Image (cartoon, grey):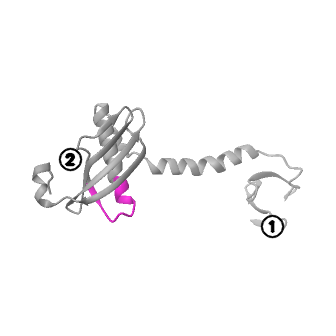
Amino acid sequence: MARCLDETTFFIEVGIQCVDMKAIKTFPRWNGRTQNPKQCKGPVFMLKLFAILIPLASVATCAFAVDPAIKKQLEKLDPSERMEQACDAEAMKRIGTDKTGFTPDKVIAYTFGDPDMKPDAMNAPGAVFRSKGDWYHLSYACVTGPQHIHVRDLSYQIGDKVPRDAWQQHYLYD
């Protein structure tokens, strides 16, 4: 049940508590009515904490979540190969979801140049990806966690289509 106690404060009853949606405070109930908010003391800290952390946690886990099957396969690789594969997979996922119009099914980091590897980061200026049967130039920078499974940051730039007559020279395939 929802009700307005004045023009500026809107309360929603949740179980045995009322939640002030404007100030994110909880107020104990007294005789079926909410006490005067100035006199109330409640678990304000916990409600504020949940109000802040839950949206942040859902954004953080959605943005760079690793599929459990991919994680299991990545754990079997040596660290440098693991970082390259994690970054390739993240680049492929992001290109496919970022309204680019592409549906990538393969990313290769080293086709037109070796990636620059650092302890927890790599820069792949000579990468390519395949979408709908065509290959495209790709440049990306990727930062991973210390175990090289979770990608912390990725930026990329899509280049031109790779001409079909250059595929064999660069070991690209249908």
The x and y percentages for residue 18 are 77, 56
Q: Nearer the viewer, residue 71 or 78?
A: 78
Q: Left or right: where does residue 49 sit relative to residue 169?
A: right
Could you tell me which residue is drawn at 81 percent across and 67 percent down? 4
* Residue marked by disc 2: 111
Q: Secondary structure at mark 1?
A: strand
Could you tell me which residue is drawn at 32 percent across and 31 percent down? 79
Residue 130: assigned label: none
Quadrant of the image occupied by residue 69: top left
Give the Cα separation between the discs numbered 2 and 1. 64 Å
The x and y percentages for residue 80 are 30, 33
Q: Give neighbour class at mark 2: few <14, some 14-19, many 20+ (Cα, 10 Å).
A: many
Rendered view: 117 above or below 131: above
Could you tell me which residue is drawn at 25 percent across and 60 percent down? 160
The x and y percentages for residue 66 are 39, 45
Give the total number of marks visible in the rendering: 2
Q: Is residue 98 magenta?
A: yes
Q: Please identify, in this view, whether the residue under mark 2 or under mark 1 is nearer the observer.
A: 2
Q: Which residues are magenta?
A: 93-105
* Residue marked by disc 1: 4
Whether residue 81 is visible, yes or no, is yes
Whether residue 74 is visible, yes or no, is no
Quadrant placement of the C terminus: bottom left
Could you tell me which residue is drawn at 31 percent across and 46 percent down? 88
Quadrant placement of the N terminus: bottom right
Q: Amino acid at mark 1?
A: Cys
The x and y percentages for residue 60 are 51, 47
